[in-house]
């Protein structure tokens, strides 16, 4: 079993984004960390075509979910992709490919050379993203987006109660966390199996896989908690990116603190495969909302 790999769950609509991510990995992957991408079996041919020559190991999503007989595959197929993908990402550990993995999204890019020691210690313990989410909550104050703070607290409380914890509202993302299989295994053995549940049941209750992982780590202590700020700069909203542009913060400056950047795929619909969805009016409406900072 490998100590550490890079992993991305994707779909055909994001194949161009996944290829861009793979290209940046090939460019900046100093330690040649293996990169795995999982997609539905039906999407494998298009990914094989677009990712050819990019040192990517492709896996069928179905092989991941099949590794856990407790998952109701029919129920999984009926829920939206943005929810079901959280289950697949969180079950990747069952394939026993690696002890830990950096869980990437298709709309990520690396922006500078990176090495394995940025994500795990020499002994193999991952650095865990954990803070109080103020990177997104503080800017929300200036724009009077109170619902962002309310949602953050509500989502935290939903997961805390399952572990009997009462305390600070932690953030375990917002994206691209490093996950250790021992933490997922402790969640499975100490919470899910005793209650006759699968991780799908948890996600249907509260769809935030990063919170379930983080709270399981705090509860069961399967690994040492080594706190880290996010590895990637995440732009949740267009107004955040516009603010950075006004303050002349560019990719070169971000590289001093982050190894990569995550842009919302909704801002780059021209990268959808095979083409941007909707008619010309919807295209223009999306671009107008981006320009106004509403996305």
Image (cartoon, rainbow, N blue to C red):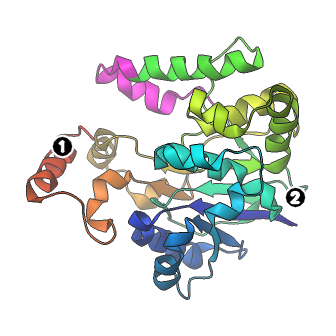
Q: Which of pointers 2 and 1 lies earlier in the amino acid sequence?
A: 2
Q: Position of residue 266 (x, y in %)?
A: 31, 52
Q: Position of residue 98 (x, y in %)?
A: 81, 62
- 145 part of magenta stretch: yes
Residue 207, above or below 270: above
Tell us which disc is closer to us: 2 or 1: 1
Q: CA distance from mark 2 to mark 1?
A: 45 Å
Image side of residue 144 versus residue 168, left or right: left
- 7 part of magenta stretch: no
Check disc 2 and report its element: helix, strand or loop.
loop
Residue at screen point 68% across, 33% down: 212
Residue 261, above or below 290: below
Q: Quadrant of the C terminus?
A: top left
Dot label at residue 289: 1
Magenta stretch bounds: 131-147
Residue at screen point 42% across, 64% down: 14
């Amino acid at each position: 079993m490998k100590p550490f790999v890079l992993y991305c769950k994707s779909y055909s609509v994001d194949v161009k984004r996944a290829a861009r991510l793979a290209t940046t990995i090939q460019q900046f992957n100093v330690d040649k960390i293996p990169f795995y991408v999982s997609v539905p079996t039906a999407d494998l041919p298009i990914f094989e075509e677009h990712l050819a020559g990019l040192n990517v190991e492709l896996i069928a999503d179905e092989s991941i979910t099949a590794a856990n007989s407790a998952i109701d595959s029919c129920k999984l197929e009926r829920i939206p992709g943005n929810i079901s993908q959280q289950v697949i990402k969180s079950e990747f550990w069952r394939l026993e490919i690696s002890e830990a993995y950096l869980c990437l999204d298709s709309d990520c890019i690396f922006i500078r050379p990176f090495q394995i020691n940025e994500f795990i210690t020499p002994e193999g313990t991952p650095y865990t993203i954990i803070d109080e989410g103020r990177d997104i909550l503080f800017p929300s104050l200036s724009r009077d987006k109170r619902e962002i703070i309310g949602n953050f607290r509500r989502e935290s409380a939903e997961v805390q109660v399952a572990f009997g914890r009462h305390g600070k509202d932690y953030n375990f993302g917002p994206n691209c966390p490093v996950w250790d299989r021992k933490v997922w295994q402790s969640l499975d053995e100490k919470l899910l199996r005793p209650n006759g549940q699968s991780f799908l049941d948890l996600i249907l209750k509260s769809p935030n896989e990063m919170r379930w992982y983080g709270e399981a780590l705090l509860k069961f202590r399967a690994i040492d908690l080594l706190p880290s700020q996010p590895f990637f700069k995440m732009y949740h909203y267009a107004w955040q990116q516009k603010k950075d542009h006004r303050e002349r913060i560019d990719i070169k400056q971000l590289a001093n603190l982050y190894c990569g950047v995550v842009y919302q795929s909704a801002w780059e619909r021209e990268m959808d495969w095979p083409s941007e969805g909707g008619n010309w009016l919807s295209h223009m409406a999306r671009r107008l909302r981006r320009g106004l900072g509403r996305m």
